[in-house]
Amino acid sequence: MNIARPMFHFLTFVQWLNDTPISVYLREGDWPFPIIETIHILGLGFSVGTVMWLDLRLLKLTMREVPVSDVIEQLEPWAMGGFSVMLLSGSLLILSEPLKCYNTIAFRIKVVLLILAGLNVLYFHKKVMHNVDEWDQNMPWRAKMVGALSLILWLGVVIAGRWTAYF
Amino acid sequence: MDGSSVNSGANFAVGFGHWLQNQPFALSIAGSDWAYPFVQATHFTGLSLFVGTNIAVDLSLIGIGKKSAAPFQISEMLLVWNWIGFAVAVTGGFLLFSVSAETYLTNMAFLTKLGLLIPLALVLHIVIQRKAPEWETAPETPSVAKIAGCAELLLWLCVATAAVLIPYVG
Protein backbone atom coordinates (compact mmCIF):
# COMPACT_ATOMS: atom_id res chain seq x y z
CA MET A 1 0.00 0.00 0.00
CA ASN A 2 1.32 3.35 -0.91
CA ILE A 3 -0.82 6.05 0.62
CA ALA A 4 0.62 9.53 0.63
CA ARG A 5 0.56 10.48 4.28
CA PRO A 6 0.58 14.13 5.23
CA MET A 7 3.96 14.31 6.90
CA PHE A 8 4.69 17.05 9.36
CA HIS A 9 8.11 18.48 8.68
CA PHE A 10 9.23 20.78 11.44
CA LEU A 11 11.73 22.56 9.25
CA THR A 12 9.01 23.28 6.66
CA PHE A 13 6.96 24.82 9.43
CA VAL A 14 9.91 26.93 10.57
CA GLN A 15 10.49 28.11 7.02
CA TRP A 16 6.82 28.97 6.63
CA LEU A 17 6.92 30.85 9.93
CA ASN A 18 10.03 32.69 8.81
CA ASP A 19 8.17 34.00 5.74
CA THR A 20 4.97 35.12 7.46
CA PRO A 21 4.37 38.91 7.27
CA ILE A 22 4.52 39.24 11.06
CA SER A 23 7.91 37.54 11.21
CA VAL A 24 9.28 39.69 8.39
CA TYR A 25 7.89 42.79 10.09
CA LEU A 26 9.47 41.93 13.45
CA ARG A 27 12.79 41.16 11.75
CA GLU A 28 13.03 44.08 9.37
CA GLY A 29 11.35 46.91 11.29
CA ASP A 30 13.65 49.31 13.11
CA TRP A 31 11.79 49.32 16.39
CA PRO A 32 10.14 45.96 17.15
CA PHE A 33 13.33 44.03 17.94
CA PRO A 34 14.97 46.48 20.40
CA ILE A 35 11.65 47.10 22.17
CA ILE A 36 10.90 43.41 22.60
CA GLU A 37 14.52 42.72 23.60
CA THR A 38 14.30 45.38 26.33
CA ILE A 39 11.14 43.83 27.75
CA HIS A 40 12.73 40.37 27.54
CA ILE A 41 15.83 41.48 29.45
CA LEU A 42 13.81 43.20 32.16
CA GLY A 43 11.51 40.18 32.46
CA LEU A 44 14.58 37.98 32.71
CA GLY A 45 16.11 40.14 35.43
CA PHE A 46 12.84 40.03 37.30
CA SER A 47 12.18 36.29 37.12
CA VAL A 48 15.75 35.00 37.33
CA GLY A 49 16.49 37.59 39.99
CA THR A 50 13.69 36.33 42.20
CA VAL A 51 14.03 32.63 41.45
CA MET A 52 17.75 32.56 42.29
CA TRP A 53 17.17 34.01 45.76
CA LEU A 54 14.53 31.35 46.30
CA ASP A 55 17.03 28.70 45.18
CA LEU A 56 19.71 30.09 47.48
CA ARG A 57 17.23 29.96 50.37
CA LEU A 58 16.48 26.31 49.60
CA LEU A 59 20.24 25.71 49.77
CA LYS A 60 20.29 27.54 53.12
CA LEU A 61 22.81 30.08 51.81
CA THR A 62 20.71 33.20 52.43
CA MET A 63 17.85 34.38 54.68
CA ARG A 64 18.09 31.45 57.07
CA GLU A 65 16.10 33.44 59.64
CA VAL A 66 13.07 33.72 57.37
CA PRO A 67 10.86 30.59 57.21
CA VAL A 68 11.11 28.85 53.82
CA SER A 69 7.36 29.03 53.35
CA ASP A 70 7.48 32.83 53.73
CA VAL A 71 10.27 33.11 51.17
CA ILE A 72 8.33 30.95 48.71
CA GLU A 73 5.14 32.93 49.31
CA GLN A 74 6.89 36.26 48.85
CA LEU A 75 9.05 35.40 45.85
CA GLU A 76 7.29 32.76 43.78
CA PRO A 77 4.40 34.91 42.45
CA TRP A 78 6.94 37.47 41.19
CA ALA A 79 9.10 34.78 39.62
CA MET A 80 6.03 33.42 37.81
CA GLY A 81 4.95 36.90 36.69
CA GLY A 82 8.42 37.70 35.40
CA PHE A 83 8.55 34.32 33.69
CA SER A 84 5.31 35.03 31.78
CA VAL A 85 6.73 38.36 30.59
CA MET A 86 9.92 36.59 29.55
CA LEU A 87 8.04 33.77 27.79
CA LEU A 88 5.77 36.15 25.90
CA SER A 89 8.55 38.51 24.79
CA GLY A 90 10.81 35.51 24.09
CA SER A 91 8.17 33.99 21.81
CA LEU A 92 8.10 37.22 19.82
CA LEU A 93 11.90 37.20 19.59
CA ILE A 94 11.73 33.63 18.23
CA LEU A 95 9.01 34.71 15.80
CA SER A 96 11.32 37.43 14.51
CA GLU A 97 14.03 34.93 13.56
CA PRO A 98 12.59 31.40 13.43
CA LEU A 99 15.16 30.01 11.00
CA LYS A 100 18.13 31.47 12.85
CA CYS A 101 16.86 30.02 16.15
CA TYR A 102 16.24 26.64 14.54
CA ASN A 103 19.77 26.55 13.15
CA THR A 104 21.54 27.70 16.32
CA ILE A 105 22.78 24.97 18.63
CA ALA A 106 22.89 27.36 21.60
CA PHE A 107 19.18 28.07 21.14
CA ARG A 108 18.30 24.36 21.07
CA ILE A 109 20.28 23.88 24.28
CA LYS A 110 18.39 26.82 25.78
CA VAL A 111 15.01 25.25 24.95
CA VAL A 112 16.04 21.94 26.55
CA LEU A 113 17.27 23.77 29.68
CA LEU A 114 14.00 25.72 29.91
CA ILE A 115 11.95 22.53 29.69
CA LEU A 116 14.11 20.96 32.41
CA ALA A 117 13.70 24.06 34.59
CA GLY A 118 9.93 23.80 34.14
CA LEU A 119 9.92 20.11 35.07
CA ASN A 120 12.03 20.96 38.12
CA VAL A 121 9.39 23.45 39.32
CA LEU A 122 6.63 20.92 38.63
CA TYR A 123 8.49 18.25 40.59
CA PHE A 124 9.01 20.69 43.45
CA HIS A 125 5.29 21.44 43.72
CA LYS A 126 4.00 17.90 43.20
CA LYS A 127 6.51 15.86 45.15
CA VAL A 128 8.64 18.01 47.43
CA MET A 129 6.69 20.94 48.79
CA HIS A 130 3.90 19.12 50.69
CA ASN A 131 5.63 19.28 54.08
CA VAL A 132 7.19 22.73 53.69
CA ASP A 133 6.19 23.68 57.25
CA GLU A 134 8.68 21.18 58.67
CA TRP A 135 11.61 22.42 56.58
CA ASP A 136 12.77 24.99 59.09
CA GLN A 137 13.80 22.20 61.44
CA ASN A 138 15.14 19.94 58.77
CA MET A 139 15.58 20.84 55.12
CA PRO A 140 15.02 17.71 53.00
CA TRP A 141 17.73 16.87 50.48
CA ARG A 142 15.16 16.90 47.67
CA ALA A 143 14.43 20.58 48.33
CA LYS A 144 18.14 21.38 48.26
CA MET A 145 18.50 19.41 45.05
CA VAL A 146 15.67 21.36 43.43
CA GLY A 147 17.35 24.62 44.47
CA ALA A 148 20.76 23.60 43.14
CA LEU A 149 19.29 22.28 39.88
CA SER A 150 17.28 25.44 39.37
CA LEU A 151 20.36 27.62 39.90
CA ILE A 152 22.41 25.60 37.42
CA LEU A 153 19.60 25.43 34.84
CA TRP A 154 18.90 29.17 34.93
CA LEU A 155 22.60 30.04 34.70
CA GLY A 156 22.67 27.74 31.69
CA VAL A 157 19.61 29.44 30.18
CA VAL A 158 21.25 32.87 30.54
CA ILE A 159 24.54 31.66 29.03
CA ALA A 160 22.81 29.85 26.16
CA GLY A 161 20.64 32.93 25.59
CA ARG A 162 23.62 35.23 25.27
CA TRP A 163 25.30 32.65 23.07
CA THR A 164 22.26 32.60 20.76
CA ALA A 165 22.36 36.37 20.42
CA TYR A 166 26.12 36.35 19.87
CA PHE A 167 26.07 34.17 16.75
CA MET B 1 34.47 75.43 29.92
CA ASP B 2 35.97 76.71 26.68
CA GLY B 3 36.40 74.65 23.55
CA SER B 4 39.96 73.56 24.23
CA SER B 5 39.22 72.05 27.64
CA VAL B 6 36.26 70.13 26.17
CA ASN B 7 38.63 68.85 23.54
CA SER B 8 41.31 67.85 26.01
CA GLY B 9 38.63 66.06 28.07
CA ALA B 10 37.50 64.15 25.00
CA ASN B 11 41.10 63.39 24.10
CA PHE B 12 41.74 62.07 27.56
CA ALA B 13 38.66 59.82 27.35
CA VAL B 14 39.70 58.47 23.96
CA GLY B 15 43.23 57.94 25.23
CA PHE B 16 41.96 56.10 28.29
CA GLY B 17 39.64 53.96 26.17
CA HIS B 18 42.50 53.12 23.84
CA TRP B 19 44.75 52.19 26.77
CA LEU B 20 42.06 50.09 28.46
CA GLN B 21 41.08 48.03 25.44
CA ASN B 22 44.73 47.18 24.83
CA GLN B 23 45.19 45.73 28.30
CA PRO B 24 45.95 41.99 28.25
CA PHE B 25 42.64 40.98 29.92
CA ALA B 26 40.58 43.05 27.46
CA LEU B 27 42.51 41.67 24.50
CA SER B 28 42.07 38.12 25.70
CA ILE B 29 38.28 38.51 26.03
CA ALA B 30 38.12 40.13 22.59
CA GLY B 31 40.30 37.43 21.08
CA SER B 32 38.44 34.48 22.56
CA ASP B 33 35.59 32.72 20.78
CA TRP B 34 33.63 31.90 23.90
CA ALA B 35 34.61 34.44 26.58
CA TYR B 36 32.32 37.25 25.43
CA PRO B 37 28.98 35.46 25.87
CA PHE B 38 30.16 34.19 29.27
CA VAL B 39 31.08 37.69 30.42
CA GLN B 40 27.72 38.89 29.14
CA ALA B 41 26.02 36.10 31.09
CA THR B 42 27.91 37.20 34.23
CA HIS B 43 26.69 40.76 33.70
CA PHE B 44 23.13 39.47 33.22
CA THR B 45 23.23 37.22 36.28
CA GLY B 46 24.54 40.02 38.48
CA LEU B 47 21.96 42.48 37.24
CA SER B 48 19.22 39.89 37.76
CA LEU B 49 20.29 39.32 41.36
CA PHE B 50 20.23 43.08 41.85
CA VAL B 51 17.17 44.18 39.94
CA GLY B 52 14.86 41.20 40.54
CA THR B 53 13.95 42.05 44.12
CA ASN B 54 14.02 45.79 43.33
CA ILE B 55 11.25 45.30 40.78
CA ALA B 56 9.26 43.16 43.21
CA VAL B 57 9.46 45.91 45.84
CA ASP B 58 8.55 48.62 43.30
CA LEU B 59 5.51 46.71 42.09
CA SER B 60 4.38 46.15 45.69
CA LEU B 61 4.71 49.86 46.43
CA ILE B 62 2.57 50.62 43.37
CA GLY B 63 -0.01 48.21 44.76
CA ILE B 64 0.44 45.23 42.45
CA GLY B 65 0.44 41.78 44.04
CA LYS B 66 -0.88 40.42 47.32
CA LYS B 67 -0.22 42.90 50.11
CA SER B 68 0.03 40.12 52.69
CA ALA B 69 2.91 38.55 50.77
CA ALA B 70 4.78 41.72 49.81
CA PRO B 71 8.53 41.13 49.50
CA PHE B 72 9.67 43.79 52.00
CA GLN B 73 10.91 41.32 54.59
CA ILE B 74 12.99 39.57 51.96
CA SER B 75 14.42 42.72 50.44
CA GLU B 76 15.49 43.82 53.91
CA MET B 77 17.18 40.48 54.58
CA LEU B 78 18.88 40.64 51.19
CA LEU B 79 20.27 44.16 51.64
CA VAL B 80 23.91 43.07 51.52
CA TRP B 81 23.25 40.46 48.82
CA ASN B 82 21.43 43.06 46.76
CA TRP B 83 24.64 45.09 46.55
CA ILE B 84 26.75 41.99 45.93
CA GLY B 85 24.53 41.36 42.89
CA PHE B 86 25.18 44.96 41.84
CA ALA B 87 28.92 44.47 42.24
CA VAL B 88 28.80 41.37 40.01
CA ALA B 89 26.86 43.35 37.40
CA VAL B 90 29.40 46.18 37.53
CA THR B 91 32.34 43.78 37.24
CA GLY B 92 30.80 42.04 34.22
CA GLY B 93 29.83 45.41 32.77
CA PHE B 94 33.34 46.78 33.18
CA LEU B 95 34.80 43.76 31.37
CA LEU B 96 32.32 44.20 28.50
CA PHE B 97 33.18 47.89 28.39
CA SER B 98 36.92 47.27 28.35
CA VAL B 99 36.69 45.08 25.23
CA SER B 100 35.89 48.11 23.09
CA ALA B 101 36.21 51.05 25.47
CA GLU B 102 37.04 53.59 22.81
CA THR B 103 33.78 52.93 20.93
CA TYR B 104 31.68 52.91 24.11
CA LEU B 105 33.06 56.28 25.21
CA THR B 106 31.64 57.95 22.11
CA ASN B 107 28.33 56.03 22.13
CA MET B 108 25.43 58.24 23.20
CA ALA B 109 23.27 55.36 24.46
CA PHE B 110 26.11 54.08 26.64
CA LEU B 111 26.98 57.54 27.95
CA THR B 112 23.32 58.25 28.79
CA LYS B 113 22.98 54.89 30.50
CA LEU B 114 26.08 55.27 32.65
CA GLY B 115 26.17 59.02 33.16
CA LEU B 116 22.51 59.73 33.74
CA LEU B 117 20.11 56.81 34.03
CA ILE B 118 22.04 54.48 36.34
CA PRO B 119 23.02 57.24 38.83
CA LEU B 120 19.38 58.40 38.98
CA ALA B 121 18.06 54.88 39.39
CA LEU B 122 20.63 54.13 42.11
CA VAL B 123 19.77 57.24 44.12
CA LEU B 124 16.10 56.40 43.97
CA HIS B 125 16.79 52.78 44.83
CA ILE B 126 18.74 53.76 47.94
CA VAL B 127 15.95 56.12 49.02
CA ILE B 128 13.38 53.34 48.59
CA GLN B 129 15.61 50.87 50.41
CA ARG B 130 15.83 53.22 53.40
CA LYS B 131 12.19 54.27 53.41
CA ALA B 132 10.51 50.94 52.63
CA PRO B 133 10.29 49.70 56.26
CA GLU B 134 8.41 52.86 57.19
CA TRP B 135 6.14 52.84 54.12
CA GLU B 136 5.39 49.18 54.56
CA THR B 137 4.04 49.52 58.10
CA ALA B 138 1.78 52.46 57.20
CA PRO B 139 -1.87 51.35 57.03
CA GLU B 140 -2.24 53.06 53.67
CA THR B 141 0.72 53.22 51.25
CA PRO B 142 1.63 56.94 51.02
CA SER B 143 1.38 58.38 47.51
CA VAL B 144 5.06 59.37 47.59
CA ALA B 145 5.87 55.67 47.96
CA LYS B 146 3.75 54.78 44.95
CA ILE B 147 5.41 57.50 42.88
CA ALA B 148 8.88 56.40 44.00
CA GLY B 149 8.13 52.75 43.13
CA CYS B 150 6.74 53.70 39.75
CA ALA B 151 9.72 55.98 39.03
CA GLU B 152 12.31 53.35 39.96
CA LEU B 153 10.58 50.81 37.75
CA LEU B 154 10.53 53.24 34.82
CA LEU B 155 14.18 54.15 35.38
CA TRP B 156 15.31 50.52 35.22
CA LEU B 157 13.23 50.18 32.07
CA CYS B 158 15.09 53.17 30.63
CA VAL B 159 18.44 51.67 31.69
CA ALA B 160 17.57 48.44 29.85
CA THR B 161 16.37 50.41 26.81
CA ALA B 162 19.59 52.41 26.66
CA ALA B 163 21.63 49.21 26.98
CA VAL B 164 19.75 47.54 24.14
CA LEU B 165 20.17 50.62 21.95
CA ILE B 166 23.98 50.73 22.33
CA PRO B 167 24.65 48.71 19.13
CA TYR B 168 21.98 50.66 17.23
CA VAL B 169 23.29 54.19 17.76
CA GLY B 170 26.62 55.24 16.32
Image (cartoon, coloured by chain):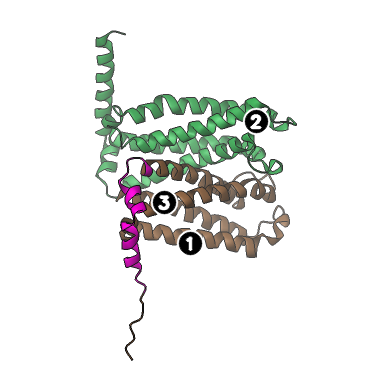
Chain colours: A brown, B green
Q: Return the x and y of residue B15 as percentages of the image width and height.
A: 24, 24
Say yes or no: labels 2 and 3 on the same chain: no
B94 above or below A48? above
Q: Return the x and y of residue B101 as percentages of the image width and height.
A: 29, 31
> Which amino acid does the dot numbered 3 rest on?
Leu
Label 2, label 3: how far apart the Cα atoms are: 36 Å
**Dot 2 and dot 3 residues touching (CB under 8 Å):** no
**Dot 1 and dot 3 residues touching (CB under 8 Å):** no
Q: Nearer the viewer, residue B169 or A131?
A: B169
Q: Is residue B9 left or right of residue A65?
A: left
Q: Nearer the viewer, residue B161 or B73?
A: B161
Label 1, label 3: how far apart the Cα atoms are: 18 Å
Q: Main SS type for the magenta part?
A: helix
Q: Return the x and y of residue B142 as percentages of the image width and height.
A: 68, 27
Which residue sits at x=52%, y=25%?
A: B123
Image: magenta residue range: A8-32
Which residue sits at x=40%, y=28%?
A: B114
Circle 3 sits on which residue? A92
Which residue sits at x=59%, y=40%?
A: B56
Determine the chain carrying the residue at label 1: A
Whether A17 is among the magenta residues is yes
Circle 1 sits on which residue? A115
Secondary structure beneath label 2: helix
